[in-house]
Image: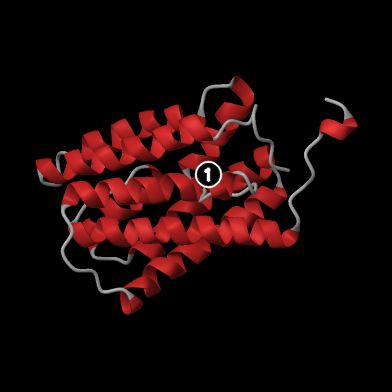
Amino acid sequence: MTESSIPPKHNFIEDTQGLALGVFLCGVSVHILTHVGLITGQTAGLAVIISYLTGWSFGAVFFVINIPFYALAYFRLGPMFTIKSLISVTAISAVTAFLPYGWQMGTITPWLAAVIAGCATGVGLIAMFRHNGSLGGFGVLALIIQDTTGFRAGYFQLLIDAALFGFAFFILPFHLVIWSLLGAVIVNLTIAVNHRPDRYVAR
């Protein structure tokens, strides 16, 4: 790659906007899913399940679950990625806590909630990936695997989701898990098709 072909780095304002957009869209997704009793995939999905089972807030559970992944992110993806991910996880914990105060949702069918949430999360995560951030957790592993082996991050996350939803069948109504699975498929296919480092390089 020649010097003239190297994409310019994102500046601070661009990174802030991209990460804020990603956090907000993912927060909206969680708000929609939990309103109808659905779950999502990855670390957020695990946090939602624990929240349903214990009554603890999603934001607090999600933040705590991500703590062990920060060390992995620091050594494999660098301090800047880790800092951005820490800020993003903290921000989405706050967004999901405050959204209900300004957005009292009405009736929405589970299948439509799954589609809307899946699209919002997929676009939100891509925005974060392209600005060198993530929501931590399994997303960190997905990016490391994609960078080192070429195996798409979306496909890896789809495998993680398969295990998570397999467990969900034992604790949630069957139809809710099926619609939740639809949302997770939309998320991961969106990432697999649209997050292509060979076509777009974020620095």
Give the residue displayed 79% in from the left and 44% down from the top.
Answer: 8
* Quarter the N terminus occupies: top right
Query: In the drawing, does residue 38 fall left or right of residue 125?
Result: left
Query: In the drawing, does residue 96 fall left or right of residue 74?
Result: left
Q: Is residue 117 visible?
A: yes
Give the residue displayed 64% in from the left and 49% down from the top.
Answer: 131
* Residue lying at the far front of the rendered structure: 4
Query: In the drawing, does residue 170 fall left or right of residue 102?
Result: left
Give the residue displayed 51% in from the left and 34% down from the top.
Answer: 194
The residue carrying mark 1 is 126
Q: Is residue 130 above or below residue 65?
A: above
Q: Is residue 203 above or below residue 144?
A: below
Give the residue displayed 50% in from the left and 47% down from the top.
Answer: 125
Residue 73: x and y in percent read: 61, 44
Q: Is residue 28 above or below residue 128?
A: below
Q: Is residue 46 visible?
A: no
In this rendered view, identify the residue nearer to me: 81 or 8.
8
Q: Which element is circle 1 on? A: helix
Q: How is the image coloured?
A: secondary structure
